[in-house]
Each structure stands twice: as C-alpha cells, then as structure tokens.
Image (cartoon, helix red, strand yellow):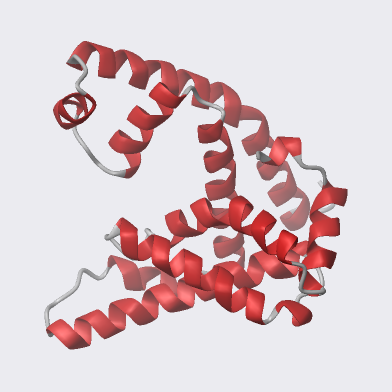
Amino acid sequence: MSLRSVDTSTFNEYASLFQRGDEKALAFFYHEFHPTLALHAHRWIEDRSIAEEIASEALVKTWKMHWKLDSYGAIRAYLYKVVQRDSLAYIRKEKKRTAMHQQSQPYQSISDTPFDHVVRSEVYRIIHTALKDLSPANRKVIVMHYLEGKTTGQIARELKLHRSTVNTQKTKGLAALRKSLLRPMLILFYLIVKIFFPFS
C-alpha cells in the first residue's frame, strides 16, 4: 500500500481506531511503517536483522501506548522516537559489552534537530514508496546495491544473472526512481520553504 493510494482521511480513520485499540489499525500501521522504520534503524545499526527487530519492537511499544496517541502524526512521531532511542541504546549496550571502539557516525545524529529528524524520516518514506513502485527485478537490484552495499558481481552471483543484466536493471531502476521521486521531493521542498519562509 503506497502513500499515493491512501488519502488523509484514511490515515486519520486508522489513527482513531489505533487509539481505541483496534488491532486492524495495528496491522495497517505495521504494513505502513515497518519497512521505513527498519531502514531508519539501519542508519545506526549495521545488522539489518537487528534493525528490523528494533522496528518491530517499536511498533509493539507504540501499541502499548495507543490510548495516548490521538493522531496519525503523533503515532508516526512516537514510532521514530522509539526507533532512534532504542537504536542508540543498543549501540551503547554493545559497546559496553564488547569493550570495542565503535565508529563515531552513529552518535553524530544525536545532535540532529527535531526538524532534521522529521525531514529525514519523510525522505525515507518517499524513497520506500518509490521503491515499491519498481518492478520486482529492478527493485531487488536497487536494494541490494544501494541499501545493502553489494557489488554488481555479488548481485549477479546471488541472483544467478549476467553482470550486464544486473547493470541494465540497475539503470532502469534508477531512471524509474528519478521519475517517481521528482514530484514528492518537490512537494517536500515546497513545505520546507513554507515553514521557514512563510511570507515568500
């Protein structure tokens, strides 16, 4: 289910059901948020399986607080807050447990402003929606190369494809992403301008 296929009234309806404890709303928000929450956690956690666990746990923790969350925006903000908090807590625990030096990059985002956090989260959601619109073959190659960091050779071996086929799918996928992302990114830019320059 993509953002383009769900209007604002539907989000608000499910947010109301979520607050009342309706499990249909939990299923809806799990489907809507889990992939992007996992990607968000992956900013700090290199292990994708751990990032996915943190995303799942964030949804459980948010569900336990459902009666306090009275809007779609409140649910979304709480989910991303829990993911960031738990991701950083995981890193601190692992660092203490292993007594090994960790790269400083995960901690740099602690100084992010709330606005940085919201914008980055929305960009993740836009990209995830665009990825879902790609063909399965193109999407698989794009995810493996750009999100999992695999080389063309590795992708070709895992998918049992010729390197030229992988390159073709990657090129087609990127072209489709550029076209799909143009309008949502322009809208996001417009909203940023309106927030910071309301009289422009």
**Is 187 placed above or below 136 here?**
below
Query: Can you give x and y, in whole percent of width and height, for residue 64 in the image?
Result: 64, 81
Query: Can you give x and y, in whole percent of width and height, for residue 93 in the image?
Result: 28, 85
Residue located at (66% from left, 64% from top): 76
Residue that protrudes farthest toward the front in the picture: 23
**Is 121 placed above or below 59 here?**
above
Query: Can you give x and y, in whole percent of width and height, for residue 99 in the image?
Result: 12, 85
Q: Is residue 81 visible?
A: no
In the shown orientation, is residue 83 left or right of residue 151?
right
In the shown orientation, is residue 176 left or right of residue 9?
left
Residue located at (37% from left, 82% from top): 89
Query: Can you give x and y, in whole percent of width and height, for residue 159 in the image?
Result: 24, 26
**Is 149 placed above or below 151 here?**
below
**Is 88 placed above or below 80 here?**
below
Residue that protrudes farthest toward the bottom in the picture: 96
In the shown orientation, is residue 58 left or right of residue 69?
left
Q: In which quarter of the image is residue 153?
A: top left
**In this figure, what is the number of numbered marks?**
0
Q: Quadrant of the N terminus?
A: top right
Residue located at (14% from left, 77% from top): 101
Residue located at (40% from left, 23% from top): 138
Q: Quadrant of residue 155?
A: top left
Q: Quadrant of residue 73?
A: bottom right
In the shown orientation, is residue 78 left or right of residue 103?
right
